[in-house]
Image (spheres, rainbow, N blue to C red):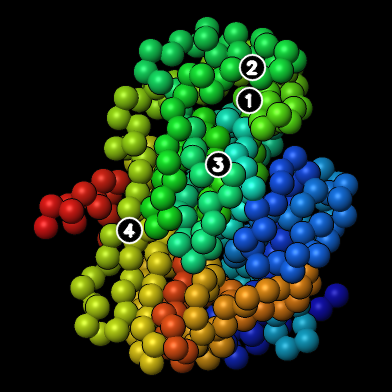
């Protein structure tokens, strides 16, 4: 086995604190690919039709994708250094605070977050992600998450660019228990109690644990906690049956037939919040007024979960022929969505099409020390260089609160 500590250390020295990552593809057996991940058309079922189509690409991940029949490293990001590869998870395990920073390493002993592109042809079932207390019962961690819809990846909205979230005020727990009782009768009718929001490229949402949501068909950038737990509460989607096992899989086995338990697991107050949009909807907020300098950095994911900042994200746009130095409060995963150039010493180039297994120049991971010192980003192309980057817990004390975008509209 390669000496990961030595390889990772050499890679960091060579890259000035920046690691090159290769694409991480994840299939979902119960979903239909939206085909906007830039994979070659022949490669969306590269893992075999029995595994399902590839409709996710994960970024800076040290989290295993909890798929049935998964491979041993499914969901994990790989670092590339010369002809050698090693997982980011192993690199973090070996070098710890040198990569993720002292505070995150001390508290979590790992890189506890990741992000992904989620790309589906149609909507997916109304589902929730368990909170920490619930997930611990099955040996996992809870999962808050967030959404941003990058315009560069959403030239087409696919079949249903609307997301149902929560329940209409006045919905009762008994209403939803009856829906779960009807699981095997076809459509259990749970969406009759919910509201759909039209999805707009260039906007986003915060999704706390235990809040139901049925993501629509825009390609979504999703900074989230490093967990893959969920429970699906909708029995039929676009005429396709949802196995009840996808409702119960991350609940204690003794409760799998207890529909009241399933409904009690929801955060009822947040699900029926009459001000749901005000409390969860996001629009970009500029970090500073830098347009005249040839670049703009914008907050795209911000806000807290139960008073805690668990992750944040920014979108950087650099004009053709310009360069800038960006400084951040913590380590981050980076994916380029438009243009070409450099981040530090590493080349950036946005591919038009990717073969399964092919290395790209669009993704990196930046260590905390490099992020704090400042990274030079240069656009060497003829179109804007645009990249998304996400951060871990408490890395962004200057991030705005939910609703901050409204202040921009008043000016």
SS at mark 2 in the image? loop
Q: Which residue is mark 1?
A: 234
Are the two marked residues, 4 and 1, in contact with CB atoms closer than 8 angstroms?
no
Which sits earlier in the primary sequence, circle 4 or circle 1?
1
Residue placed at 25% from the left, 52% from the top? Answer: 405
The residue wearing badge 3 is 160
- Label annotation for residue 188: 2
* Residue drawn at (80%, 48%) of the image: 52
Upstream in the sequence, badge 1 or badge 3?
A: 3
Of the numbered discs 3 and 4, the one sitting upstream in the chain is 3
Q: Circle 4: is it few (<14), some (14-19), or many (20+) Cα within 10 Å?
A: many
Crowd rating for badge 2 (residues with CA inside 10 Å; few <14, some 14–19, many 20+): some
* Mark 4 residue element: loop
Residue closest to the eye, 19 or 202: 202
Q: In this rendering, would 406 be left or right of 181?
A: left
- Badge 3: residue crowd in 10 Å (few <14, some 14–19, many ≥20): some
Classify 10 Å Cα crowding around label 1: few (below 14), some (14-19), many (20 and above): many
> What residue sits right under mark 4 in the picture?
284
Q: What label sits on residue 196 in the rendered view?
A: none
Tag 3–tag 4 contact (CB < 8 Å): no
Query: Can residue 158 be seen at all in this image of the molecule?
Result: yes
Q: Nearer the viewer, mark 3 or mark 2?
A: 3
């Amino acid at each position: 086995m390669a000496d990961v500590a030595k390889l990772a250390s050499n890679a960091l020295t060579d890259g000035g604190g920046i690691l090159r990552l290769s694409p991480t593809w994840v299939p979902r057996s119960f979903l239909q690919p939206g085909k906007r991940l830039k994979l070659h058309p022949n490669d969306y079922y590269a893992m075999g039709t029995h595994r399902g189509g590839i409709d996710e690409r994960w970024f800076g991940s040290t989290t295993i994708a909890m798929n049935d029949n998964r491979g041993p490293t499914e969901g994990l990001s790989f670092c590339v250094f010369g002809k050698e590869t090693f997982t980011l998870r192993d690199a973090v395990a070996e070098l710890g605070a040198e990569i993720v920073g002292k505070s995150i390493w001390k508290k979590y002993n790992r890189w506890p977050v990741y992000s992904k592109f989620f790309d589906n042809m149609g909507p997916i079932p109304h589902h929730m992600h368990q909170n920490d207390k619930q997930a611990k019962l099955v040996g996992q961690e809870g999962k808050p998450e967030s959404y941003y819809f990058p315009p560069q990846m959403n030239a087409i909205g696919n079949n249903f660019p609307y997301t149902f979230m929560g329940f209409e005020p006045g919905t009762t727990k008994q209403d939803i228990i009856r829906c779960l009782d009807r699981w095997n009768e076809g459509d259990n009718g749970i969406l009759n109690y919910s509201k759909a929001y039209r999805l707009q490229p260039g906007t986003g949402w915060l999704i706390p644990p235990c809040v139901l949501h049925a993501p629509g068909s825009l390609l979504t950038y999703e900074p989230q906690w490093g967990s893959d737990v969920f429970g699906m509460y909708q029995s039929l989607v676009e005429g396709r049956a949802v196995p009840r096992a996808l409702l119960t899989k991350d609940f204690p086995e003794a409760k799998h037939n207890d529909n009241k338990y399933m409904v009690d697991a929801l955060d009822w107050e947040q699900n029926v919040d009459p001000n749901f949009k005000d409390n969860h909807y996001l629009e970009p907020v500029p970090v500073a007024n830098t347009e005249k300098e040839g670049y703009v950095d914008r907050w795209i994911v911000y806000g807290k979960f139960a008073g805690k900042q668990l992750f944040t994200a920014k979108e950087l746009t650099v004009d053709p022929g310009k360069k800038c130095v960006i400084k951040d409060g913590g380590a981050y995963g980076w994916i380029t969505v438009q243009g070409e150039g450099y981040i530090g010493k590493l080349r950036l180039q946005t591919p038009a099409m990717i073969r399964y297994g092919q290395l790209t120049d669009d993704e990196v991971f930046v260590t905390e020390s490099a992020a704090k010192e400042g990274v030079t980003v240069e656009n060497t192309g003829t179109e804007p260089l645009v990249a998304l980057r996400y951060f871990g817990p408490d890395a962004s004390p200057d991030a705005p609160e939910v609703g901050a975008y409204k202040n921009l509209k008043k000016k």
